[in-house]
Amino acid sequence: RGLKLRLGENDLQQQEGTEQNRLVAKVIPHPFFNPTTLDNDLMLLKLDRPVALGRAVWPLALPRTCAPEGTTCLVSGWGTITTPQGESSKPIVSFCGRARLKAQRSCSEAWGSIIAHTGQSCSRPGGDSGGPLSCNGTLQGIVSWGLQTCALPGRPGVYTRVCNYVGWIQNIMSHN
């Protein structure tokens, strides 16, 4: 498919010496991904060769349990940033922000029947689609979707709840 990844990137306009380029050797989407509802919105990518771990590239542990509502987590990426004045911009340097997990009920109240799957959770602010939501050093979420502008009242970002997919992830990794 010709997919390329750049790991260890921070500043999009400057080489920092931490970047590592890799080709994607294999794409493994979740078998029950629904492009309409975005249920099961995750896929695994097998790289053409290993990466060097260091200060700019490191793995997050898979969770043993789902993080409870109210847990403060971190979200990062280059997604659109909206100021309190309503101005939005695309950052050049990756951002990292705090996000508090909301109850499933809050997700359903904010988004109605769109959020009907326990494989999704909500938090504010949103992030960069595909980016990590890390809680206590574990990968609890993958940014799935939300509104174009982040942090609008009553409209939290939606994440794929990784804790519900650990078995699938481990099975795929052990066979690839």
Image (cartoon, helix red, strand yellow):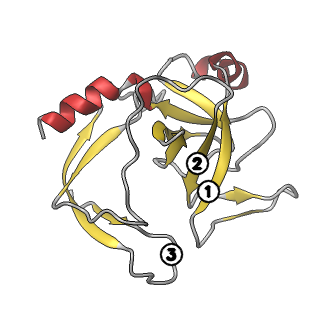
| Residue at 52% from the left image edge and 81% from the top image edge | 13
Instruction: Report the Cα–Cα distance between label 2 and label 1.
Output: 6 Å
State which quarter of the image contains the C terminus.
top left
The image position of residue 70, as x and y in percent, is 69, 28
Callout in the foreground (3, 2): 2
Q: Secondary structure at mark 3?
A: loop
Callout in the foreground (3, 1): 1
* Residue 71 placement: quadrant: top right
Q: How busy is the neighbourhood of tag 1: few (under 14 within 10 Å), some, or many (20 plus)?
A: few
| Residue at 55% from the left image edge and 52% from the top image edge | 128
The residue that mark 2 highlights is 75
> Which numbered disc flags the more N-terminal residue, 2 or 1?
2
The residue that mark 3 highlights is 12
> Which numbered disc flags the more N-terminal residue, 3 or 2?
3
| Residue at 44% from the left image edge and 70% from the top image edge | 9
- Single out the residue that lies furthest toward the right: 85
The residue that mark 1 highlights is 96
Examine the rendering and report whether any part of residue 142 can be seen: yes
| Above-or-below relation of 16 to 125 | below
Instruction: Report the Cα–Cα distance between label 3 and label 1.
Output: 15 Å
Q: Which mark is residue 83?
A: none
- Single out the residue that lies furthest toward the left: 175
Instruction: Report the Cα–Cα distance between label 3 and label 2.
Output: 18 Å
